[in-house]
């Protein structure tokens, strides 16, 4: 495959550098980038001189703002299926990163959202800075957390993951560490020196030790102080009851969370809550990715994804017209449809993989 320059590769010492290089699009992922990253990981694993991989994003704004959702909307409007092929390879890449046998260092500096979380938060060494803003904002575009997001958020302490999934709220370094989305805090001013030190490492153990040497205490976050009402309110069985508890608990931040949730797609909210509950009962990231592929494949055919991207990205009027418009209008059957088996179109990463699971591309 002929490579464009959307993913830059080079080796310094024994470290393979992978740089997402679409800075004007905040390094949003497209299918070619996913394939390039997969090829780069294959080569790095097979190259005995490479001891670790370092993922960074070009530009000053962040690692990656997610997937190229404008093109996904265009595909949906045209009745296409290329987005399903993109997700198939993207989710396989997420699983590949999680199982990569060498240190995979992700510099989660600046904005890291959606697909950006998928290529970083499954890595073995995840570095955040005071500039980090990490989010899974899918419910705001009529979609559901994917790229292993339901697995990650489902594993967060208490109901923190439910709060982040439903509200789409972005968190900083301390809260990312608390939620298990990152491993180390390094001040952004020290990142160049960290990279230089990593490039001088000659063993995987030295890579781990170097990240520990540069790590420090993150500036205080917000979520730890909100655990009491978050855990109490989001433990409810339905989105409607969660909102009722948030509105009634007497905490201004909880009331604001309720108001935020009510701006999101009702269908996406109910499917997200169900997906998180199911993901907590699954035995592996791969099984969660299989489930997410079913959910994404159905959401792709529903009206809210097209409308949500229109409102947030295309027209930017921030006034989506969801269909259905109210939580009460979303039935149990509507939710269950998103988890229905896909037959021969299954992703097939988990232990129950059946036919139709071959890698595309």
Image (spheres, rainbow, N blue to C red):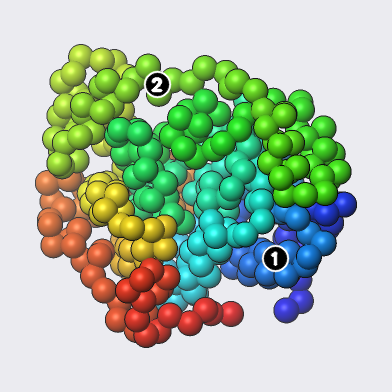
Q: Residue at x 31, y 53 (%)?
A: 279
Residue bearing the label numbered 1? 45
Query: Marks 2 and 1: which is nearer the front?
Result: 1
- Res 50 quadrant in image: bottom right
Number of other residues with Cα within 10 Å of mark 1, as a class: few under 14, some 14 to 19, many 20 or more: some
Residue bearing the label numbered 2? 224
- Res 173 quadrant in image: top right
Q: Residue at x 32, y 74 (%)?
A: 352
Number of other residues with Cα within 10 Å of mark 2, as a class: few under 14, some 14 to 19, many 20 or more: some
Residue 205 falls left or right of residue 101: right
**Front-lying residue, 171 or 74:** 171
Per the model, the C-alpha gap separating discs 2 and 1 is 38 Å
- Res 327 quadrant in image: top left
Q: Secondary structure at mark 1?
A: helix
Residue 10 falls left or right of residue 207: right
Q: Residue at x 34, y 20 (%)?
A: 226
- Residue 15 seen in this snapshot: yes
Q: Position of residue 243 (x, y in %)?
A: 19, 32
Residue 145 falls left or right of residue 125: left
Q: Position of residue 246 (x, y in %)?
A: 21, 25
Q: Which label is found at residue 328?
A: none
**Front-lying residue, 73 or 355:** 355
Q: Secondary structure at mark 2?
A: helix
Q: Position of residue 154 (x, y in %)?
A: 34, 45
Q: Position of residue 338 (x, y in %)?
A: 26, 64
- Vertical position of residue 284 compared to residue 85: above or below: above
**Front-lying residue, 333 or 128:** 128
Upstream in sequence: badge 2 or badge 1: 1
Which corner quadrant holds the N terminus?
A: bottom right
């Amino acid at each position: 495959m002929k490579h464009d320059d959307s993913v830059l590769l080079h080796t310094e010492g024994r470290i393979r550098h992978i740089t997402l290089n679409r800075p004007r699009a905040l390094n949003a992922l497209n299918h070619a980038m996913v394939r390039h990253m997969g090829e780069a990981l294959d080569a790095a694993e097979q190259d005995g001189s490479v001891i670790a991989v370092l993922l960074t994003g070009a530009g000053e704004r962040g690692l990656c703002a997610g997937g190229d959702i404008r093109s996904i909307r265009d595909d949906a409007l045209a009745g296409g299926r290329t987005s399903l092929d993109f997700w198939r390879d993207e989710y396989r890449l997420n699983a590949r990163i999680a199982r990569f046998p060498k240190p995979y260092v992700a510099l989660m500096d600046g904005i890291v959202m959606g697909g950006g979380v998928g290529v970083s938060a499954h890595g073995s060494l995840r570095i955040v800075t005071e500039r980090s803003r990490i989010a899974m904002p899918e419910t705001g575009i009529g979609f559901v957390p994917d790229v292993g997001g339901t697995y990650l958020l489902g594993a967060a302490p208490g109901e923190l993951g439910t709060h982040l999934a439903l509200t789409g709220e972005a968190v900083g370094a301390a809260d990312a560490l608390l939620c298990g989305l990152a491993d180390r805090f390094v001040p952004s001013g020290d990142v160049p020196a960290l990279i230089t030190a990593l490039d001088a490492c000659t063993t995987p153990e030295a890579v781990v030790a170097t990240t520990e040497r540069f790590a420090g205490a993150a500036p205080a976050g917000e979520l730890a102080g909100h655990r009491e009402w978050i855990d109490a309110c989001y433990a409810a069985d339905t989105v409607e009851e969660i909102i009722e508890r948030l509105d009634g608990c007497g905490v201004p931040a909880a009331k604001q969370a309720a108001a935020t949730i009510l701006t999101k797609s009702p269908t996406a909210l109910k499917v997200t809550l169900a997906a998180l509950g199911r993901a907590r009962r699954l035995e592996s990231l791969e099984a969660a990715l299989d489930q997410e592929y079913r959910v994404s494949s159905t959401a792709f055919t529903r009206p809210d994804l097209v409308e949500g991207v229109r409102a947030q990205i295309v027209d930017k009027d921030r006034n989506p017209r969801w269909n259905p418009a109210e939580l009460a209008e979303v039935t149990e059957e509507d939710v269950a449809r998103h988890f229905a088996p896909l037959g021969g179109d299954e992703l097939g990463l988990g232990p129950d993989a059946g036919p139709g699971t071959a890698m595309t591309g």
